[in-house]
Image (spheres, rainbow, N blue to C red):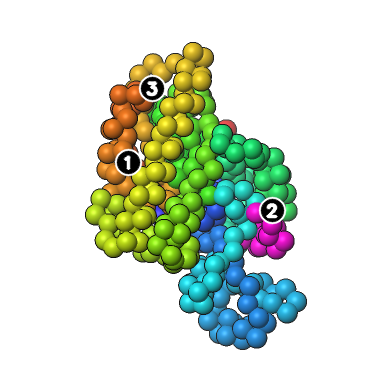
Amino acid sequence: MSTDKSDKTKPNRGVGLDLGTMNIVSARSRSGKVDFSRIRDAFLDLDISAKKMLKLSGVSYIERGENIVVIGDAAMEMANVFGREARRPLSRGLVAAGEVEALEVLGVMVKNVLGAPVEPNEVCYFCVPAAPVDEDRDVVYHRGVFERIVTECGYKAISSNEAMAIIYSETANEGFSGLAISFGSGMCNVALAVNGIEGFSFSVARGGDWIDEGAARAVGSTRSRICALKEKGFDLLAPVGREQEALALYYKSLIEYCLETTAREFLRIKDKFSLPKAVPFVVSGGTSLPTNFVPFLTSVWSRMKKKFPLEVSEVRHASDPMNAVARGLLVLALQEYDD
């Protein structure tokens, strides 16, 4: 549900914050509903001469010396207009080490979606990806950066696993038991839980950006153009044209890679963590939005089903794939205020 601007009632205490590579999303509870606020995780530098036009159009920007830094959806739109690549303060799921402006941009974006706390040190659960199993990268710096940013916004910052947030959001009817994969832009995060207890969690260093880059190389296009085409919407089971066909092929490769890695990781812990019964397999994230994503995934999964070591009761989409992580983090934040 979107924020109702006409609702002036004070929100409940506690907020969830999804720090995605493509979108930053906050979730609050107000009058029995959940309000979401989103900003596109992208920026583009322009000459200072663009300032007057940006003011007229109401575009969000930051002034830096002789440059203007445009943030949010406008950065992606302008990148496509000028044939440029929008820059990201997050890269492949983590804070972009090479972007000197990344920390300032992230601070502005987080403040934009969080707003002021309801009370001093209001609890904010923010998501952190699990360490990737296919690359030597850790999340310590990433977690520390966002803990500082959220704290500076006036909140008590508590980190939580991204894929486990989907478990909290989507599997209440199953006693918070399930396998969840968050198909994000920078990474894909995976978690398995039984009765809310985590069995394993990990990430792979591939996601929507990896799809865009591969498809762009294959057809001689730009990543921004392929990303825009993907987000405009297409059917994975009926791609039209070379660009959509390239996207479908890279989607298939990503899904296979995630499933194979999930099977391998489960085999590593199966002697220590048993499943008493079949669990739902829930998929979410912006990369899961193309038409027929779940049937497409199921067709890939069915070919390896006999070798898949987890017993799955069903494969289903999160009820709100773009907001599921923020909603799950909100569930945790609200628990902090349960009397």
Query: Relative to residue 322, is residue 281 depicted above or below?
Result: above
- Kind of residue indicated by mark 3: Pro
Specify whether 334 is left or right of 255.
right
Secondary structure found at label 2: loop
- Please, what is the three-letter code of the amino acid marked with disc 2? Ala
Q: Residues within 10 Å of mark 3 (few under 14, many from 20)?
A: some
- On the image, numbered disc 3 is attached to which residue? 309
Sequence order check, earlier mark of 2 and 1: 2
Work out how far the residue at label 3 is from the one at label 1, CA to CA, in angstroms: 17 Å
**Is 42 in front, or is 167?**
42
| Residue 31: percent from left, percent from top | 46, 51
Which label is found at residue 297? 1
Identify the magenta region.
96-109
Task: Work out whether mark 2 precedes mark 3 in sequence or the reverse, and give the earlier one.
Answer: 2
Residue bearing the label numbered 2: 97
Mark pair 2, 3: CA separation? 37 Å
